[in-house]
Amino acid sequence: MLACCSLLLTWVLVATRGQSQSWRPCTDLLPLDLLARALPRPGQAPPTQVQMVQSRGSRGLRLAGATLSFPASQIFTNCDYFPAEFSLVATIKIPRLRQKRNQYLFSAVDESSDLLLLGLRVSENRLHFMTTSSGAGGRGRLSFKNVGLDDNRWHTVVLAITGPYATLTVDCGLPLELKQVQSFPGALSTRGARFFVGSRRRGSGRFSGLLRQLVLLPGSDATARLCPTSDPSLAELSVPQILKSTPLQPDHQGPAYPYGVEATVTLGNRPVCSRAEQGQLWFNAQRKGLFICDGLTWRTLLQNPERLDYVEDYQDLYTRSETFDVELFSIPSEGLFMAAANRDSLSGSSLYKWRNGSFQLYQNMSTQEARAWKHFTVDDRIFLVVANSREVEPELSIIYRWNHRRRRFLRYQSLETHGALDWEAFQIHNHSYLVVANHRRARDSNHNIQSVIYRWNPDTELFEVNQSLSTSGAYDWEFFTVGPYHFLVVANTFDGQSTTISSTVYVWLDGRFQTFQDIPTVGATDWETFQIEGRFFLAVANSQKISDRGPSPYSINSTVYELSALTQTFIRFQDILTHSAVDWEFFTVGDEKFLVVANSYDGSSHSLNSVVYRWQGYEGFVPVHSLPTFGCRDWEHFSTDEGSFLIYSSATTRLSKVFKLRTY
């Protein structure tokens, strides 16, 4: 109806002036992209003062004193009259404006008299629409107050004019309607007029913000075309192609505008990084680094490499019972968690969440002499699997799944295990696998049994047996890749007679794991794999030398092996004296590489120093810090906004400890 009234009025005006004997609109009733018309055509050089700027993930033009204009006759091709009913659409980003400062988004000016025919301008927290009656020479102004456009954020505004009514819609919100004393001129002639974008022809009143969209829609309210939308502040009716395409593509044929990105530098703790913050900077004073948001995560631009200075006591964590293992992991939109594998079956095991700079109890879970946890994901599903070692029939270990609605882990699947001590999760060719370290069968106390690899079945959404491997008192599994090859290594501890046995490295060939290399170990309890400058290493924790002849020493060498490109096997690189070692943890601080060992027992005491070793090239790993521990069973390294930390669990007391790594 609005469009029909506008067309009728245009026809009456044209017929009255005798310019045509048949009805024709003054212009097309399609969106007229005023910004695109004011810009140079493809092949023409752009104004030197126009700059393309990306801000909060979207691009706009900063005019910087440039005058962009075009004659009104370019769009009013059939007659000279501005539509009596229309809407203006603008997408803008305006910094805070000073009081009594006005800036024009758009104006139409009579070139001969410099008379302002109409204009759209902004001032502090206000939007003004200016009109001039060509007949009487009067001037009108509509002012929308408290619109909040000058907040340095993107906004899309729609100003619709219908008779005496003017309606303003900001970001597809509730419309604000004003009634004019007089209706918009029904016969506003644009003959000899020129449209200016971002100014009122003269130097004063130039627009200083970013302009992404400026569209005139004759005859109708554009709000219905724009709203609703998923991003109302950037709703599009017609945006110039130059602001949509990649500005630096080499085959681009349009004008090459100077390109920049607005950046805000944030201090303090890690801020949010999303599409709205893309291109923003964050300075982390603690880490002495400058980071940029890529729309998903913070990426390092500049950072002074940290160096480990000393280790300090940070948190005493009293668990429900002795703790054999801790597993740290993050859940998107939830935060950092730690699962503790506790000995006592009655009290079960606990899940802790990092809150306000420390671990706090989050959830209790039923376990049977838990020895290890493993976190893993399958597609968008989040799981925890526990290794239950209690030797009572049936021997079952449990997979728990994270419930997003209840924000808890719930029991999902039971798997038959035998004295399970460890789980490893991995993926090969987009298939998800689990492997369990079966230590000893309860019914016959046999250590020489099968450890089992399970594969996720996407049809049943369950793990099913895929392959069995012969192991001897299996204690730990470690999965790693070298180039295109996938490996599994098992820590075999005891074959029923001796701990001086071989642990096996397996390689994935023809859809299954096959023996790659047997490595002599002594009561192996853990493998740790890591890379340093393109070199591949395996470190084994040897715990105890047991045989039917003589005493059983606990202070023995643990060994670091390196993959030799010449022999294509792992060869001995370094022996390190340890005391019933049960875990290695590799971590980095800045450019430095470290190994920390869990020394648990020396034959007379569980109160021992666990040692941090630093990589020193040709010298190998050199001891740099000795940390007093009691019955140390597991080490884990993690980082938060508060810094870098180490946590160890104790298999002989309820006390686990968190240490903070102080750097300089």
Image: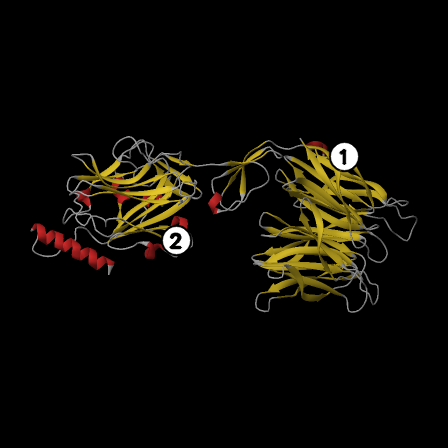
* Image location (x, y in percent) of residue 521: 78, 48
Mark 2, secondary structure of its residue = loop
Task: Please count the marks in the image.
Answer: 2
Farthest residue, direction front: 181
Quadrant location, the N terminus: bottom left
Q: Earlier in the sequence, mark 2 or mark 1?
A: 2
Q: Which residue is mark 1?
A: 623
**Residue 24 seen in the current view:** no
* Image location (x, y in percent) of residue 620: 72, 35
Contact? badges 2 and 1 (CB < 8 Å): no
Disc marking residue 172:
2
Is 139 or 9 nearer to us in this picture?
139
Q: Quadrant of residue 418?
A: bottom right
Is 190 or 133 nearer to us in this picture?
133
Q: For the residue carrying disc 1, how many other residues have a C-alpha within 10 Å: few (<14), some (14-19), or many (20+)?
A: some
Q: What is the three-letter code of the residue carrying label 2?
A: Cys
In screen coordinates, is 87 left or right of 229?
left
Q: CA distance from mark 2 to mark 1?
A: 64 Å
**Residue 520 seen in the current view:** yes
Disc marking residue 450:
none
Above or below for 326 versus 194: below
Quadrant location, the C terminus: top right
In screen coordinates, is 78 left or right of 246?
left
Is 599 or 348 nearer to us in this picture?
348
Mark 1, secondary structure of its residue = strand
Q: Residue at x 61, y 32 (%)?
A: 305
Q: What is the three-letter code of the residue carrying label 1?
A: Pro
* Image location (x, y in percent) of residue 115: 20, 36
